[in-house]
Amino acid sequence: MRFYIKTFGCQMNERDSEKVEAILFENNWQQVENPEDADLIIVNSCAVREKAENKLYSELGRLKFINPKAKIVAMGCVAQINYEKLKHIADIVIGTNTIDRFYDIARDKSKNGVFILDKMTDPDHIFPHTSRISAFVDIMYGCNNFCSYCIVPYTRGREISRNKDAIIEEIKQLIDKGTKEVMLLGQNVNSFENSKNYRFVDLLYDINKLDGLKRIRFTTSHPKDFSKELALAIRDLDKLCEHLHLPFQSGSDRILKLMKRGYTKEQYLSKALMYREIVKEGSITTDIIVGFPSETQQDFLQTVEVLKTVEFETSFSFKYSKRPLTRAANMDNQVDEEEKLKRLNYLQKLQADITQKKLKAYEGKTIEVLVEGQSKKHNGFSGRCRQNIVVNLEFRDNITEGKIANVVITKALKHSLVGKVQGQ
Ligand code: 5AD
Ligand code: SF4
């Protein structure tokens, strides 16, 4: 049997799609690049912005048109909340908490229908992987923060930490299969809790002890819970990479309050600058929303100020999108689309200049790169440095996947670096 899978959205969705792929491979299914060749078509959906949700509906329509014989599965965040609508478009609707039943449902025609649960049956279950050098590992599921713009607590449910032993066992299995880097995933990893006296930093210390593993990364940190202890762990643990993704969303205290973020601009800045101070060679990236309801030009300028003060290596900025079920959807003074776009363009231009300055500073430096494989865009190998910047390698002799190489940076491009392995 042959399957085709298309994934929208974040790293959690990428990991969920990987789980499905690995489960199907274990059962001797074959993955195809062309949906016309598939018996089963799977679309993993994202609900975080309206545009992503609309893409799901048009993609399902397109896929059904080009391959009417295939069975169609809609899974992921839109499936979890909009199953009533999707059950008329897809043969099977699988929510974010029912992936463990995927194969059982997908292989059996009599099981077409909707499969949604509020909670996962067994969060400690170890799903298989297909990845090699770098692998995603869930450490927690869901979110309890209910930021007023965000649909995630509804699509992924309440926060639940996986048991530390299950996480460590999963990483050990990955190491045995050749994995060198793990990316620990959670909506808010700082609130990971195995027990009262075993928290996220304790988990990092234990993972750092695992032989054979070269690198540890994590995402996402919530600023309200980001601590000096974690910054010190990033400085002190040899495997833990010097990169922090710390979304600030807005620089205006008034907007932050309406967003229910739980920190002020000053509190955010003091944490970001504390990280810069402790982790000298570290990089920091962020997420920003422009045009949240009632955001004025003055509010927006506060966001600009944070961008200029922290000088993020990269930022991901988005126009506010009204989401069902969220508090902000009913707020007055929604900002018009044209104004949102103007603010977004301004911010993205400013960020491009900052990114360029940051990348240029790497020219002539020697940095450590984990070679991840052949680059799709660039002719040769590529990998990432500890700061999570993509590095394309100039020469290919003596380079193999999974190797840590010292690379001299020869050139900064728009979003990546070019370098050659030292000694070549
Ligand atoms: N509109 C726009 N951006 C959003 N995000 C989350 N919800 C929305 C929304 N309703 C952004 C936030 C978050 C990132 C993953 O997506 O910046 O950090
Ligand atoms: Fe959404 Fe806020 Fe939870 Fe992040 S912390 S997933 S933005 S509710």
Image (spheres, rainbow, N blue to C red):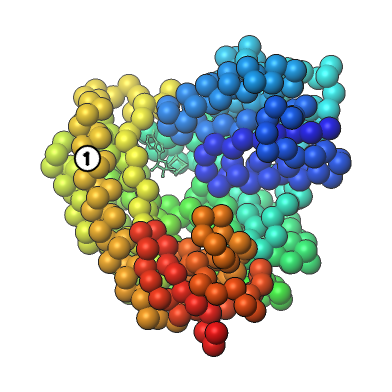
Query: If the picture is divided into quarters, which one holds ligand 2?
Result: top left
Which residue lies at the image location 81% right of the left edge and 44% below the top edge? Answer: 25
Which residue is painted at 66% across and 41% down in the image? 17
Q: Residue 180 or 35: which is nearer the viewer?
A: 35
Dividing the picture into quadrants, the one containing residue 207 is bottom right
Q: Amino acid at mark 1?
A: Arg
**Left or right: 308 as drawn, with respect to 222:** left
**Residue 131 can be seen in this image:** yes
Task: Where is residue 51? Give x, y as percent.
Answer: 42, 28
Residue 272 pos. (x, y %): 33, 63
Q: Which residue: 74% across, 66% down?
A: 178
| Residue that lies at the very extreme toward the top in this rendered image | 88
Up-down relation of residue 155 to residue 350 (above or below): above
Give how far across and how far down residue 324 sits, in percent.
43, 23
Rendered view: 296 above or below 71: below
* Image quarter hosting the C terminus: bottom right
Q: Which of the two residues, 300 or 421, is positioned nearer the viewer here?
A: 421
Query: Between residues 22 and 416, which one lies in front from this camera angle?
Result: 416
Q: Is residue 79 above or below residue 265?
A: above
Left or right of 128 on screen, residue 65:
left
Image quadrant for the N terminus? Answer: top right
- Find residue 361 and report its horizontal and vertical position in percent: 32, 74
Image quadrant where residue 135 sits: bottom right
Residue indicated by mark 1: 343
